[in-house]
Image (spheres, rainbow, N blue to C red):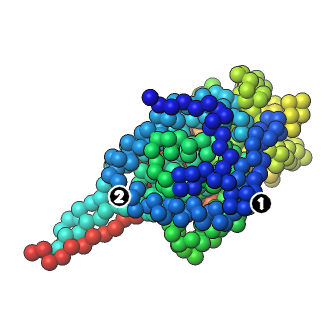
Amino acid sequence: MTRQFELKELIRPDNFIDGQWRAAADGARFAVTDPATGTIITQVADSGPADARAATDAAARALPAWRDLLPKERATILHKWNALILANQDALGALISLEQGKPLAEGRGEVAYGASYVAWFADEATRIYGDIIPQQQHGKRMTAVKEPIGIVAAITPWNFPLAMIARKIAPALAAGCTVVAKPAEDTPLTASALVLLAHEAGVPAGVLNLITASRDHAVATVADWLEDSRVRKITFTGSTPVGKYLARESAGTLKKLSLELGGNAPFIVFDDADLDAAVTGLLASKFRNGGQTCVCPNRVYVQAGVYDKFADMLSRRVSELKVAPATDPDAQIGPMINIRAIDKIARHVDDALAHGARVLAGGRRLPELGPHYYAPTVLADATHEMLLCGEETFGPVAALFRFDDEAEAIEAANNTPFGLASYFYSQDVRRIDRVSRALQAGIVGINEGALASEAAPFGGVKESGYGREGSKYGLDDYLSIKYLCQGNLA
Ligand code: SIN
């Protein structure tokens, strides 16, 4: 029988190292708050380098035995973990909503989304094949085998407190690696709950270690992993500046990196698009998690012939979105994560208005609900001089840019250092082929706004990073290839 936990049993304020819950070495703690109200939920361990080192020591001790399990033995444990996550979907979903602010339905949805990666990689664990290389000389046999890369450090963001860490830990464990992990300081509780369930599922002591750290301590704590040659891989989701920092600072020990970094996704609506589908797709992709995802469209390019109609259809639908705390069953947009996020959104909207944008919906903070709420917004007449064109707003703001022809749209869409997701709507098959090839992005949504799936490769090009999560490619990031050359066989 799969154990079900109460929400309060899932809240673990300590680090998990070598199979035990432990306070930080110096006893320091920091507050985790509910973004809807600012209320402190609990005080968690504020780790330092000594805690990071203890986690790595545990992961190093556990590695040989975990690596040597049969793949199907690791798969069995991962399947149990998946079952436990799903059995605790309501409590985990509520915890996500409590510390991150997304509406309850989205919190529950994220649990299923995260679990799907665990189930996927449980199966993939049993499909790590190598190659027998066609013989080149008599008496010599050449093979390529895949081995776990070693200890993996996973550093994860606040916007999907469960799914992002699940899609890093699951492939690492499936591959036979051990893990040290640090979740974002805004949302450490879901990650700890997930680790609790992994332990309950039978992940042995030391195989999965998690430490929490405040914004002030994070750099010094993670530095210990960056310098430690036993840590062979960093997997990170977050901002491009932090990704570049990790790449620079881990160069001393030449770690393998997977970096899922910022985006600035274009969403193009051509004159020949199905406008109803385009509006629905934009609502799904732009306003998911209140606009706080790396794949949210940030620049909406609409062709001149349908611009006014599309703007009207979109702003009507956006005005109907219900903004409320996660606990309201009808909530569609919750609070933003913190005051820095809200200030950035307001700065982008104010700057756009100063440069001539028009508000078609929203366009203001909602202090009547609390300091972290912003009204879902549609801006018309956006231009490339505006801040929101160059940087991800990471909030519920859809900025509409007008364009005349396909070449202009592609040129504008690609005119960014980033290349994570992109979207376009058209019903012309030749255009679909041309535009799919021309867009510089790791992910292209064609007449579709919902892209994520455990079976698909998720990742970017250019300064959106490298490596892929999910899919049959997702395990490669946690494996290294060993070439075996056996001679004197004749
Ligand atoms: C992200 O925002 O980084 C991930 C979004 C997703 O998995 O769809």
Question: x, y (%) of residue 69?
Answer: 35, 54
Q: Dot 2, how many residues are within 10 Å of its Cα: few (below 14), some (14-19), or many (20+)?
A: few
Q: Is residue 82 visible?
A: yes
Question: x, y (%) of residue 198?
Answer: 51, 44
Q: Nearer the viewer, mark 2 or mark 1?
A: 2
In the image: residue 362, left or right of residue 212: right
Residue sitting at 49 percent across and 53 percent down?
205
Residue sitting at 80 percent across and 41 percent down?
40
Of residue 15 and residue 226, the one placed in the foreground of this image is 15
- Mark 1 is on which residue type? Asp
Q: Quadrant of residue 260?
A: bottom right
Of residue 117 and residue 176, the one placed in the foreground of this image is 176
Nearer-N-terminus badge (2/1): 2
Contact check, label 2 and label 1, Cβ < 8 Å: no
- Mark 2 is on which residue type? Asp
Name the image quarter holding the N terminus. Answer: top left
Of residue 405 and residue 59, the one placed in the foreground of this image is 59
Q: Secondary structure at mark 1?
A: helix
In the image: residue 378, left or right of residue 302: right
Residue sitting at 75 percent across and 42 percent down?
42
Name the image quarter holding the C terminus. Answer: bottom left
The residue under label 2 is 68
Q: Quadrant of residue 24?
A: bottom right
Vertically, is 307 above or below 253?
A: above
Of all residues, the one furthest to the left in this rendering is 490
Question: x, y (%) of residue 287?
Answer: 69, 35
Residue sitting at 67 percent across and 54 percent down?
23
The residue under label 1 is 216
Picture disc at residue 38: none
Q: CA distance from mark 2 to mark 1?
A: 38 Å
In the image: residue 257, left or right of residue 372: left
